Image (cartoon, rainbow, N blue to C red):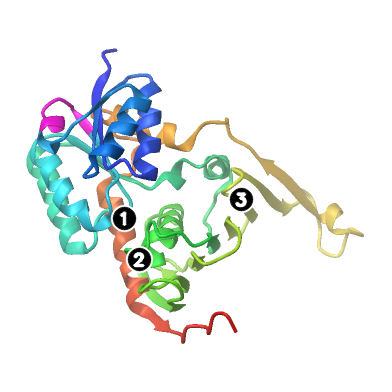
């Protein structure tokens, strides 16, 4: 199998991780990186044994595929430049700043018949992979995603920065149904945009999701709970682990002296694998002609649309008086 020549556009914290993975990923040849900060590009290129390209067009002329990890505000312009050169794109989430920009990117990808994927990496999380075999008509989701404050990502609201992961997961796990009711409250604390949001989303078909995202928390938390007729799933996305609680087979109402006699707790496991490595491997497979495992850009648009719905629905709360 001949390796696919690939590049990374934007080598901040996330792009740097992509470059490191691609430099050692089977089936990939990391040709080079591009960044508007030449010193940063040179540093990452030296780390990963590739070239730092001073001009984006020069990189695009030598690769078949790129990972785009630039700020969200630049997704549209950079994506059009890459797709217009018939280069396959894995765009970091969110797909774009607006649905209009997302639609232009999708149209450009269709025009050139080029692979266009979006980086919703939580789809490849070990806990999500472990839960797949026991998922059966989930009806209620509860997601909590907390992170300490850092300047990266504050060019958008926390909904597009963090909550969009859980909005994508819930939409995907409940069958991609359309949201029919969206309610939310949020507050800006340390940035001009929303830093904490709680949302309730009802999907077509009746599934409901309650989501909380904050980027002003003390600790990092990434948890998802799923309730369905056959049981209750708890997932720790940070640890990549989970459990499934269900009634024991043969249990009859009124019997059993303890919860343990009534409820069976099943550990959920999946093969250990790095989520970014799986995401990149799926992208390369799509470039070779098998798009079955990527998160398609159309799905990224759906997640963006829902995130924008949540943002629009937010009832803004007064900011707390810090330092008192």
Do we see residue 288 in this rendering?
A: no
For marks 3 and 1, give the CA distance.
23 Å
Residue at point 71% right, 44% down?
Answer: 266
Tag 1's secondary structure?
A: loop
Marks 2 & 1, CB-CB < 8 Å contact: yes
Is 190 inside the magenta-drawn segment? Answer: no
Tag 2's secondary structure?
A: helix
Residue 254 is situated, as x and y percent measured from the top left of the image, at: 86, 65
Tag 3's secondary structure?
A: strand
Which image quadrant for residue 91? top left
Which image quadrant for residue 219? bottom right
Q: Earlier in the sequence, mark 3 or mark 1?
A: 1
Q: Earlier in the sequence, mark 3 or mark 2?
A: 3
For the record, the magenta segment spans 58-65
Left or right position of 69 against 206: left
Rendered view: 146 above or below 300: below
Badge number at residue 4: none
| Quarter of the picture holding the C terminus | bottom right
Residue 182 is situated, as x and y percent measured from the top left of the image, at: 40, 75
Rendered view: 8 above or below 163: above
Q: Nearer the viewer, residue 74 or 254?
A: 74
Specify few, some or many for label 3: CA neighbours under 10 Å numbering under 14, 14-19, or 20 or more.
some
Q: Nearer the viewer, residue 49 or 194?
A: 49
In this view, the residue farthest toward the front is 39
For marks 2 and 1, give the CA distance.
9 Å
Residue at point 67% right, 48% down?
Answer: 243
């Amino acid at each position: 199998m001949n390796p696919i020549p690939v590049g990374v556009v934007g080598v901040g914290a996330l792009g740097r991780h992509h470059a490191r993975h691609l430099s050692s990923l089977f089936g990939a040849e990391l040709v080079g990186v591009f960044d508007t900060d030449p010193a940063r590009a040179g540093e990452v290129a030296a780390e990963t044994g590739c070239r730092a390209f001073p001009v984006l067009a020069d990189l695009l002329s030598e690769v078949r595929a790129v990972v785009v990890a630039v700020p969200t505000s630049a997704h549209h312009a950079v994506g059009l430049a890459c797709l217009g050169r018939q280069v396959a794109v894995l765009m970091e989430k969110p797909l774009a700043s607006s649905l209009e920009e997302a639609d232009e990117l999708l149209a450009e990808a269709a025009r050139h018949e080029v692979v266009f994927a979006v980086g919703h990496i939580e789809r490849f999380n070990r806990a999500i992979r472990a839960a797949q075999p026991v998922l059966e008509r989930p009806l209620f989701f509860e997601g909590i995603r907390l992170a300490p404050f850092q300047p990266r990502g504050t060019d958008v609201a926390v909904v597009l920065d963090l909550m969009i992961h859980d909005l994508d997961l819930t939409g995907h796990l409940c069958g991609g149904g359309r949201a029919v009711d969206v309610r939310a409250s949020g507050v800006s604390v340390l940035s001009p945009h929303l830093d904490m949001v709680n949302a309730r989303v009802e999907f077509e078909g009746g599934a409901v999701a309650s989501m909380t995202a904050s980027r002003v928390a003390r600790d990092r938390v990434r948890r998802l709970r799923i309730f369905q007729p056959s049981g209750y799933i708890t997932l720790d996305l940070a640890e990549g682990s989970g459990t499934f609680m269900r009634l024991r087979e043969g249990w009859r109402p009124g019997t059993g002296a303890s919860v343990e006699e009534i409820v069976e707790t099943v550990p959920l496991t999946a093969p250990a694998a790095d989520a970014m490595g799986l995401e990149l491997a799926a992208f390369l497979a799509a470039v070779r002609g098998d798009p079955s495992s990527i998160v398609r850009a159309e799905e990224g648009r759906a997640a963006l649309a829902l995130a924008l719905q949540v943002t629009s629905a937010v009832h803004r709360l007064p900011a707390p008086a810090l330092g008192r």
